[in-house]
Amino acid sequence: MVSAPSTPQSAKQQWFSNDIAILCYFGLFKLLLHFCTNQQYGYFGDELYYMAAGEHLDWGFAEGPPLTPAIANFSRWMLGDSLFAIRLFPAIAGACTVILTGLIARDLGGGRFAQVIAALAVILAPGYLFLQTVLTMNAFEPLLWALCAYLTIHILKTERISLWSIAGVVTGIGLMNKFSIFFFIVSLVLGILITPARRLLFNRWIIIGSILAISICTPTILWQINHHWPFLEHQRESSLYEKKGLLQSAIDLILQQIILTNPGAVPLWGCGLYYYLFTRSGKPYRALGWSYIIILGWFLLFEGRFYYLLPIYPMLLAAGAVFLERRLQHYPAWKYTTLIALIASGLVLLPIALPILPIKSLIRYSNTIYRPPTLSKFAQENSAQAPWHFRLMLGWEDTVAQVAQAYQKLLPRDRAECAILAWSYGNAGAIDFFGPAYHLPKAISGHTGYYFWGPRDYSGNVVLSLGGNLTFLRQTFNSVETVAIVTHEKIVGLRSTLPIYLCKGIKRPLSESWPAFKYYFKQPTTNLITTDNLS
């Protein structure tokens, strides 16, 4: 008896059963997760700064390259100023990171279970959930690092050394986003050099890739050189005034990897590291395991912040998923146990990663479950406040409204020449963004990138200073008086006060004394320009 020929699957059926299609669905889920949650609370302080930086586009900024300000500018041009518009591209980057992690697992030989669990681990990682909610440089790092890792794995697997040219382009784009990708690339190269795969490095394609990377990032390097390397100055001040010391930084760095990647995913990426370093099937990719060890050592030595390592985990999660799939292929119960543990721990930490709870509930939840540490060694946590990363989404417009009240009380002739001086880029960005609705002029500030945009055309004869050191202000102006105190009594989860000073009669024109206002982390307490002039 002749059996009937099988009916070919339709194109639609083939798509639904395709591994890449399934990964796309997971990426879409990640995208929708952000779309449904990222319009809560308010603008993040860094977002306000990057929107202001987008209005002053240049090849570089004090704290880094220009890609994120350019994205902020493009988002506003394309979709407007809404939270959805500003946070669209971080969400897309998050979705692409999910898909790419699954593809890494696939390239390592992982089946559908490995691809799914790797993608799910990225979706549920608290660090990625928050970083890809808001528009900062950190939102795009996991995608760019994962893409470099994917290309490296594919080169090690297929020996298609021409792909080094594409890796060079990705590296160049990464350097235009954030300079920290340099550490990852160097660690990868060192990892390859200490393994037999070193033979894949010495060829014309690696030279072409290097030339492409350098060519792409040359404009921002030249900007840094022409401005006397403000990025290095920024990092030096960070080490002096904000980092917590070698031991505490090391403890934070190590412990926060457990939280930020999801405690349920720690065995997964731990197995990934083991897979790269010790297994026979992972031997061709041993360089990636060494790259993690090398970059971890660097960040421990240089007191890197606890989120600096986050972009490297997609390649570890993918490898760990492949390792577990093979080890558990005859133990389906353990497969589902691993999956349930991953999902359960991710859901527990979800309110700390995404802005989904009312502020009062968030404060209670964070005090009970987990309160993330602040970045600064000087910041004091307060259990009555929201966690620091959500606190930076609160109160910006309220601050601007109170500044506007003080501004409107000025005499008309004073208001006509009044400059609003903000002593943090967050407050300056808030005034620039919300100020037009309150009839406020653009702010000036000596903080980070704002310093390089100068004092605009203000004389400095009348200045409303939002905060600032009183000694510095009295050395700079003939008259300094407190005219208001910014408070946030009606905003749950935010407790802060900030004086507003009315400063008159600048002792030296603002254009001449502007260098004295420059700072990155510690506000100036002495105006050396004015005091030197008086002496």
Image: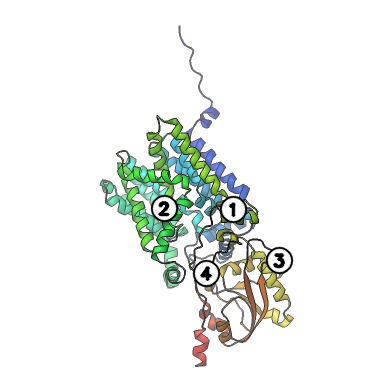
| Residue 365 marker | 1
Identify the residue under disc 4.
Answer: 449
Q: CA distance from mark 4 to mark 3?
A: 24 Å
Which residue is at the front of the view, 160 or 386? 386
Residues at circles 3 and 1 in contact by the CB criterion of under 8 Å: no
How much space separates mark 3 and mark 1, taking CA atoms? 35 Å
Amino acid type assigned to the residue bearing label 4 in the image: Gly
Task: Return the disc, 3 or 1, that comes first in the chain's sequence.
Answer: 1
Asked whether residue 487 is in view, the answer is yes
Residue 468 figure quarter: bottom right
SS at mark 1 in the image: helix
Tell me, for residue 437, which label it has, or none. 3
Please give the label number shown on residue 169. 2
Q: Which residue is at the front of the view, 75 or 376?
A: 376
Label 3 secondary element? helix
Q: Residues within 10 Å of mark 4 (few under 14, many from 20)?
A: many
* 58 with respect to 240 (left or right): right
